[in-house]
Amino acid sequence: MTPLIEARDLVRIYQIRRGLFGRPTPVRAVDGVSLQVMPGETLGIVGESGSGKSTLGRMLLGIDDPQEGSIRFQGQPMPARHTAQWRALRARMQLVFQDPLAALDRRVTIGNQIGEPLEIHRLIPREHQGARVTELIRAVGLRPDQADRYPHELSGGQRQRVVIARALASRPKLIVCDEPVSALDVSIQAQVINMMRDLQESNGIAMVFISHDLKVVRNIADRVAVMYLGRVVEEASSDAIFRAPQHPYTKALVSSVPVPGKPLQGRVILQGEPPNPASRPSGCAFHPRCPLARDICRFTVPELLDIGEGRTAACHVVAGETTPVAA
Ligand SMILES: Nc1ncnc2c1ncn2[C@@H]1O[C@H](COP(=O)(O)OP(=O)(O)O)[C@@H](O)[C@H]1O
Ligand SMILES: [Mg+2]
């Protein structure tokens, strides 16, 4: 089966100036990421703030261009930006980000905002638009009579539901969600995530679900890619990531996720500085914080290797423990 979206070796470099007179220095925000998302699949992307998740998400949607690497959508190269083909493709790919108020126009009723993509992309005859808006409002768990409300009259969770309804209006194949519930109360997060999962399953939409919080992706992702300083350090099924994380960084993230009814046993506390791409450590970028670091980790960048059972990891220690299957 052809992946819906396939990224190869994506690199995105920002020029960052330190201080007023500092010379701009290149910072590799995303540093060689490859990934695939199959139709209808949800890929979770997790990692601490600054690991390059948002930059990666924007490149997948064609909002930012990679300096290196390539992206294919349904087997075809991404069309050049602002062409008719690009616009058509953009309707098939939607972004939901953290702040629904910033995504919505406060002077327009939510019904009209949800209907906007139908209008812009002329997706259905005008006489059917009202019914479709009602259907979308119901699909995200709002009431049809709320269509006349304005964004500020709704709660944060309801506003994010409006943003999701609008994203669904153009019947996308892919939705990139960048920290979609991070601004919401913890009590609301699970409701919104469950709603998103139901919609994603019933509409067969593929999703890239970005979060700094591993527990948020647990109930929605089929697979999880863990990022550290612009690179994927481990990728596996969501099950495998939580059951048996391999990379020491993933282990630390997983061990900090509380399991209901269980004490946080064997919790690995992440020490040292959080990742900063402006001062990337040599070798394995995680080595200064890694409890298992050896000499090689300081000098040699570990490759992302197949470690069996459909999972990959970039770690010298893990690779050393994985015995290659004899031919
Ligand atoms: N537009 C930008 N200009 C300069 N640096 C940026 C820009 N966007 C992101 N960065 C830098 O790139 C790195 C990765 O950022 P980001 O992709 O936002 O990570 P995440 O979403 O994982 O927190 C950070 O160090 C950030 O400061
Ligand atoms: Mg981000």
Image (cartoon, rainbow, N blue to C red):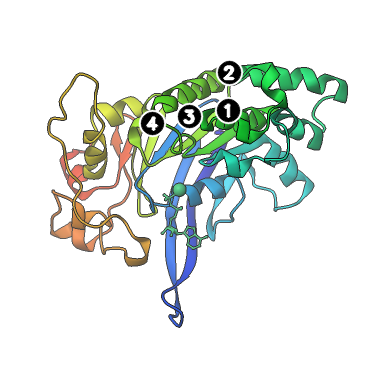
Give me the disc on residue 246.
none
Q: Amino acid at mark 4?
A: Val
Q: Amino acid at mark 2?
A: Gly
Q: Amino acid at mark 3?
A: Thr
Left or right of residue 141: residue 280: left
Residue bearing the label numbered 2: 141
Q: Decide: is 23 above or below 87.
A: below
Residue bearing the label numbered 4: 216
Where, quadrant-wise, is the C terminus in this rendering?
A: top left
Where, quadrant-wise, is the N terminus in this rendering?
A: top right
> SS class of the residue under badge 3?
strand
Relative image position of residue 33 (x, y in whole percent): 44, 49
Q: Ligand 1, what quadrant?
A: bottom left
Instruction: Measure the C-alpha gap from mark 1 to mark 2.
Output: 8 Å
Residue bearing the label numbered 1: 161
Mark toward the viewer: 4 or 3: 4
Task: Please tell me which residue lies in front, 209 or 294.
Answer: 209
Task: Please tell me which residue lies in front, 131 or 300.
Answer: 131
Instruction: Measure the C-alpha gap from mark 1 to mark 4.
Output: 17 Å
Q: Earlier in the sequence, mark 1 or mark 3?
A: 3
